[in-house]
Amino acid sequence: MKRLFAALAAVVALSAQANDTLTVAATAVPHAEILEFVKPQLAKEGVDLQVKVFSDYVQPNVQVAEKRMDANFFQHQPYLDEFNKGKGTDLVAVTGVHLEPLGAYSTKYKKLDELPGGATVVIPNDATNGGRALLLLQKAGLIKLKDNGNILSTVKDIAENPKDLKIRELEAATLPRVLTQVDLALINTNYALAAKLDPTKDALIIEGGDSPYVNILVARPDNKDSPAMLKLAAALHSPELKQFITDKYKGAVVPAF
């Protein structure tokens, strides 16, 4: 009888392992696509990966912090740091996965030096991506910041603006939709790709591969080391995924491992 109970316990344990569910919030491109790529491998390892797509940069963190989702995949460390600070959360990075260089796009001009005086420029309105956009404008020689290395710079920190650019802040997800209405838009690569823009061809200027804004898998302190989470982290560092990212995004998304 004891042997029978032991056997049944083993079956139950294996069944639980085979049905280990991991829910991850992600933006559509490339994050959800990357997660869908590793999903079959995780299934072989007993993890049912369920991906829920979000279009904004706030709810994925809220969902994880409130334990409605296990993890998210959409942001870089500077953004997470600012979110935790502003919202009082304690979300943590599990692992870095890839880099999405931020780019400047225009439907009216082919070169940045064609921008006229008083041109309208839109940038993301969240602290880290807004500062990131301003640093890119500075790199292009369009503005000069009071602190030329501060990733949290805002439009109030612009020291020189020789072309009198009208810089407006909008939610990052809306930037592709207003591209035709402005002179220049600085767009995160995930939203650029979703809008069928090719960052390697369409961006008038783009961050280099040395950008520190690596996109990360994020979880809570209580589940960051769970077996399922660690299996996902390993899958997100596999040679197969590296090849997938390289082949599919052709430089618009760069593996960071």
Image: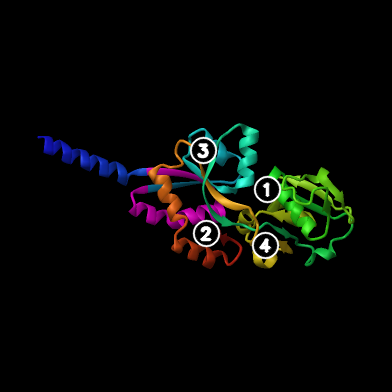
Q: Earlier in the sequence, mark 3 or mark 1?
A: 3
Question: Pointers 3 and 1 in contact (CB under 8 A)?
Answer: no
- How many residues crowd mark 1 within 10 Å: few (<14), some (14–19), many (20+)? many
Q: Amino acid at mark 3?
A: Val
Q: Viewed as shown, does residue 38 lie left or right of 167?
A: left
Q: CA distance from mark 3 to mark 2?
A: 25 Å
Instruction: Locate residue 220, reporting x and y percent.
Output: 50, 38
Residue corresponding to mark 4: 208
Res 9 visible: yes
Residue 8 in magenta stretch: no
Q: Amino acid at mark 4?
A: Gly
Residue corresponding to mark 1: 172
Q: Earlier in the sequence, mark 1 or mark 2?
A: 1
Q: Viewed as shown, does residue 55 lie left or right of 103?
A: left
Provide the secondary structure element on which disc 2 rests. loop
Res 184 visible: no
Q: Earlier in the sequence, mark 4 or mark 1?
A: 1
- How many residues crowd mark 4 within 10 Å: few (<14), some (14–19), many (20+)? few
Q: Viewed as shown, does residue 148 lie left or right of 174?
A: right
Q: Closest to the observer: 205 or 176?
A: 205
Q: Specify start and end residues of the magenta stretch as a single range.
A: 21-47
Residue at 51% in and 32% down: 66
Residue at 84% in and 65% down: 114
Q: Nearer the viewer, mark 4 or mark 1?
A: 4
Residue corresponding to mark 2: 257
Q: Amino acid at mark 2?
A: Phe
Provide the secondary structure element on which disc 4 rests. loop
